Image: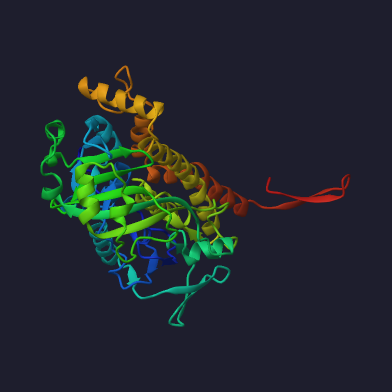
Amino acid sequence: MKDEIPATPLKAPLQIRFVIVGGGIAGLASAIALARVGHQPIVLEKSDGRKNRGKHGLRISPNMSKILYHWGLKQQLLDIGLVSSVLLFTRSDREELLGAQIWDYELLEEARGDFILTAHEDLHRVLSETAIAHGVDIRYNAEVVDIDPDCGEVRLSSGESMLADVIVGADGETGISRGTLVGQHDRGTPVGMSVVSATFDTAAVTRDVPDEIKDAVDLEKNMIFVAFGEGGGAIGFPIHRRRDMNFHFLVQDSETEGTWGDPPCSDLKTLVRNPCDPRLRLVADNARDAVRVVIKEYSELDSWVHDSARLVVIGQAAHAIPPIAIQGHAMAVEDAAVLGKLFCHLSSREQIASFLYAFQDIRQRRVATIREVELETIWFMMLEDGPEQRVRDASMKAKYRAGKNAMAGEDGEEDTLQWKEVRETFGYDCEDEAENWWMQWGRLRERAKGVELSQPREMIFSFGVVSITESTEG
């Protein structure tokens, strides 16, 4: 794809103070987006800055990489990641190739982004360094224990208090920001499934693969391996310049607690059931530092913005997306980009509330659509053995033998799932959406205010209905 020259953003006429609770991907991205347009963000991270940097793999979708490219981070991303163009589909319970998907170059060109495979810790480091370069103050070991949205105040465990014009809650589903917004701590409801992330040596896991799969595998193309199974499955992809493979196992699990940053779990061997593909079995039996993330359902938020218009939640704190989904981090970065784009137009404190509510309006519909697509994908991946599964597998294998993409329609055209993924998901430009809102509504409101303030006013008395109205007509 063509290199995009990073745009120099406009600086906001009025520059205000943001306190961002949470120093993960969502928090750092929002800090960068706001600092780029001249605001003064402070990031408060409760950990020491190392514990929240996961060793697990992370898939950066084109709609996410597009934003980071626009921010001038293309070379940094290519330095830490691998560009992928192929998905390989197999069965998780046996050595069986189902098909492959090669993403069309023209569609990715249209999306203006790439699939990039990297490690969470590497992306976190890039975003941290970028935020600091933009003048962002990142404070570690700064645990927020209380938020007073009405006063725009946060209190730390150290006893220190900080004031903000706007507090951005980027501390996840169970963080204090979401709890403050809804009035109670939301622990979520386990759904009986977990994602277990594990890293393994690439050479060991790709040794002795069957000829059918070996012929289809080209590590130079940085393939993403997707294994379908009954009630579960796995996704694997190379990281660390192909030295390692990271696997996300989707497993049935009775555990009720577990999240990123927890100590390694020792249950992967028993959680991955037999029969099992030999390479997946090898990883499950021998992987170190496996991390279990329990999948939970969280209540939908009616509002992402506190009534005071001094607190807004973003990322997982606003919209929980299952941890195995590719779009979780992408939605957080899109949130950040929209915040930055809206607040680059800030010229009056009176605009803050309308910008925050516009942020929710722009993002809520987009996230709801993405979440539906992700849940459909997960369901498709873990179909129970039966008629639907047999139709799925037979269709994919027939297309593979015919030299077609696994997601292609029977007539060779893209089917609904691919159309959603590429045309709607990857091609979507959240910053354009934010700018469209400003041009259509935000600027119009400001002009209306200007006209209202500049026009002479006279009182018109309507004695017939005994009411008083105000007119700006000259």
The picture places residue 394, in percent across and down from the top left corner, at 30, 24
The one nearer the camera, 474 or 38, is: 38
Q: Is residue 250 above or below residue 393?
A: below
* Residue sticking out furthest to the front: 274
Q: Give the side of residue 111 with respect to residue 464, left or right.
A: left
The picture places residue 5, in percent across and down from the top left corner, at 23, 46
Q: Is residue 172 above or below residue 93?
A: below
Quadrant of the rendered image containing residue 404: top left
The picture places residue 90, in percent across and down from the top left corner, at 25, 35
Q: Is residue 215 above or below residue 367?
A: above
Query: Which residue is located at x 36 percent, y 76 percent?
Result: 141
Query: Which residue is located at x 33 percent, y 22 percent?
Result: 409
The one nearer the camera, 125 or 111, is: 125
Query: Which residue is located at x 14 percent, y 36 percent?
Result: 217
Regarding residue 310, the answer to whether it shows in the image is: no
Regarding residue 85, the answer to whether it shows in the image is: yes
The one nearer the camera, 322 or 180, is: 322
The one nearer the camera, 136 or 435, is: 136
Question: Which corner quadrant holds the N terminus?
Answer: top left
Numbered marks: total: 0
The picture places residue 459, in percent across and down from the top left corner, at 76, 52
